[in-house]
């Protein structure tokens, strides 16, 4: 069993199955024990229409959790922070409790999303999260 957790937003390049987007590459490389995928309002519809939950689940041997956020403006730092703070704290506690390594995908998402996600990881986690871009 893998001791890795993958945390990522879904970006536009992750919305087409089998196109080797960042999330797909990281799942194949890390083979995470658990994967958390955050969705903004803009990408929810396309994500579910393309059956991506099932597709990403088919790449995993472990658990997948989809987090539907209410982020309407992916460039608004305050809106992003408000919508992911509770979940990132929950993920952090899970990592610490289970002594797992967390990996952030710093490829998928807007610069504002990636900044807020990174800052929360640094603030909440004492060294167990690692940032990973595309492999």
Image (tube, rainbow, N blue to C red):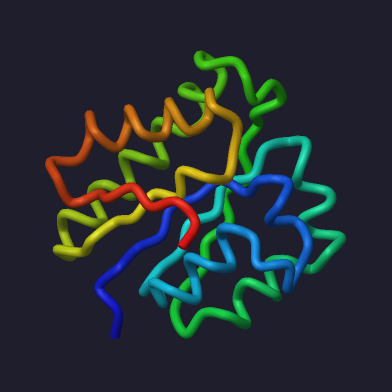
Question: Residue at the spot x=48%, y=57% of the render?
Answer: 36
Question: Residue at the spot x=32%, y=31% of the render?
Answer: 120
**Residue sitting nearer the eye, 44 or 133:** 133
Question: Residue at the spot x=54%, y=67% of the render?
Answer: 25
**Residue sitting nearer the eye, 111 or 46:** 111
Q: Residue 100, percent across and down?
A: 21, 64
**Residue sitting nearer the eye, 115 or 77:** 115
Question: Residue at the spot x=71%, y=25% of the render?
Answer: 72
Using the image, determine if residue 48 lies above or below residue 117: below
The residue sitting at the right extreme is 49
Q: How many marks?
A: 0
Lateral position of residue 85 relative to residue 97, left or right? right
Residue 37 sits in quarter = bottom right
Q: Residue 111, percent across and down?
A: 54, 27
Using the image, determine if residue 107 lies above or below residue 57: above
Lateral position of residue 48 relative to residue 20, left or right? right
Lateral position of residue 96 relative to residue 39, left or right? left
Using the image, determine if residue 78 lies above or below residue 109: above
Q: Residue 102, percent across and down?
A: 29, 56
Lateral position of residue 14 relative to residue 29, left or right? right
Task: Please identify the quadrant where the N terminus is shown.
Answer: bottom left
């Amino acid at each position: 069993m893998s001791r890795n957790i993958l945390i990522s937003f879904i970006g536009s390049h992750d919305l087409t199955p089998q196109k080797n987007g960042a999330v797909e590459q990281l799942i194949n490389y890390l083979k995470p024990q658990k994967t958390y995928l955050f969705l903004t309002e803009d990408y929810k519809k396309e994500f579910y229409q393309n059956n991506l939950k099932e597709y990403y689940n088919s790449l995993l041997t472990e658990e997948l959790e989809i987090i539907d956020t209410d982020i309407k403006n992916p460039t608004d730092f305050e809106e992003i922070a408000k919508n992911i703070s509770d979940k990132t704290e929950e993920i952090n506690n899970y990592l610490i409790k289970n002594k797992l390594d967390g990996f952030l995908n710093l490829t998928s998402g807007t610069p504002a999303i990636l900044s807020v996600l990174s800052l929360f990881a640094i603030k909440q986690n004492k060294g167990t999260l690692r940032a990973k871009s595309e492999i």
